[in-house]
Amino acid sequence: MRTLIILSFIVGVLAPGVAGAQQAGAPALDEQQTQGRRLLNQHCAICHLKPQLGAATFGPALSKETLGGQEAVLREVIGNGLPRMPGFKHEFKAEQIGAIIAYLKTVPAPVAPAKP
Ligand code: HEC
């Protein structure tokens, strides 16, 4: 039982968080999605991906379900930022933001943490 809890915890933490990992059964990324994953790792990881097991992140986990997966809303948030998040519209071209969104669409929603 304890192993199961620990395992589901690890899956819950790693599955959505490790953007570099190719998950079993997940489709291979195309060129645009690969570019998006790289940009996310370089520019967003500090706040949105866990640096180590059990660590908290400053920003929420990102996945295909973030903001209902609505492309226009994602573009607006990534471009203009939020109160605690910088905007990227001066740093990124429209197609770079598009690549990040294309990659996010491949990221499964986080698994709910195991109940003790
Ligand atoms: C300085 C830390 C920081 C960086 C860097 C950052 N974010 Fe955020 N992000 C946040 C925080 C914090 C929030 C939660 C909203 C708030 O508190 O303002 C957020 C919210 C979001 C949301 C909305 C999530 C939701 O569920 O409502 C999206 C989408 C998002 N970020 C995407 C990105 C992308 C893509 C990048 C990289 C290009 C990025 N963020 C870089 C801190 C950051």
Image: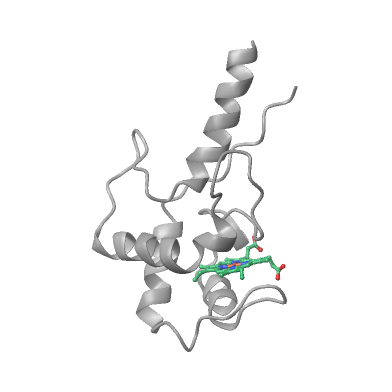
Decide if residue 17 is on the left or right side of residue 112. Answer: left
**Side of 43 relative to 4 (left or right):** left
Q: Is residue 105 above or below residue 42?
A: above
Residue 93 place in picture, x, y as percent? 38, 84
- Expressed as whole percent of the image width and height from the top left, the position of residue 49 reads 54, 53
Q: Is residue 87 above or below residue 56?
A: below
Residue appearing at x 60%, y 53% in the figure:
61
80 up-or-down from 115: above or below: below
- Find residue 59 and report its image quarter: bottom right
Q: Which of 21 and 63 is in front in this view?
A: 21
* Residue depicted at 64% across the width and 57% down the height: 60
Q: Which corner quadrant holds the C terminus?
A: top right
Furthest residue toward right? 116
Q: Where is residue 104 in the image (x, y as percent from the top left)?
A: 45, 58
Which of the two residues, 61 or 67, is positioned nearer the viewer here?
Answer: 61
Q: In which quarter of the image is the N terminus?
A: top right
Name the quadrant where ligand 1 sits. Answer: bottom right
List the single residue furthest toward the top: 1
Q: Nearer the viewer, residue 59 or 101?
A: 59
At horizontal 40% and vertical 73% (from top left) the residue drawn is: 98
